[in-house]
Image (cartoon, helix red, strand yellow):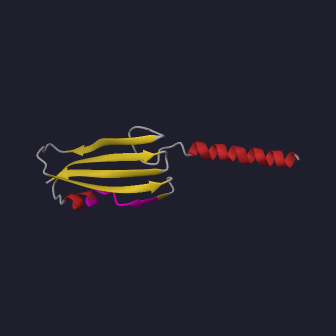
Amino acid sequence: MKQIKVALTLVGITAAALSLANCAPIVASPMAGTTFNETKYGNIATAETATTKEGKACGTTILGAVAQGDASVMAAKANGGITKVTSVDHSAKSILGIWGEWCTIVKGN
């Protein structure tokens, strides 16, 4: 009987530790939102202000365990037909830590 109590205690401690480990956001963002997070933030900008094009490239994740996509600056440039970059921004979206999306947004000409 004592072994069963010890085993159940260890299972409970392990479950609690794993559930606390999942509190971390599954996408990078300057703000934390464990239930819902939708943020947009700047990263790099040049002095040039006249932009005519915008390209976006995203990657997604499920449960923070499986991730796929190309959110690189090169992919965003290609998606927007941009040759000269004037700014690079990012956006992050996460719902309940189940689904997340991280995007790179490039503006330029």
Name which residue lies at 88% across and 47% down. 1
Q: Give the residue at x 60% y 45%.
A: 19
Residue 49 % position (x, y): 13, 43
State yes or no: residue 65 in magenta: no
What residue is drawn where x is 37% and y is 46%?
Answer: 92
Q: On screen, 35 above or below 75? A: above
- State the count of labels: 0
Counting from the top left corner in percent of width and height, residue 70 is at 34, 60
* Residue shown at the point (43%, 50%) measured from the top left: 100
Relative horizontal placement of residue 1, taking residue 65 as reference (left or right): right
Which stretch appears magenta? 67-75
Q: Nearer the viewer, residue 94 or 76?
A: 94
Task: Give above or below for 21 relative to 84.
Answer: above
Residue 52 position within the rendered picture, expressed as x and y whole percent measured from the top left: 13, 51
Q: Is residue 41 left or right of residue 31?
A: left
Q: Could you tell me which quadrant the C terminus lies in?
A: bottom left
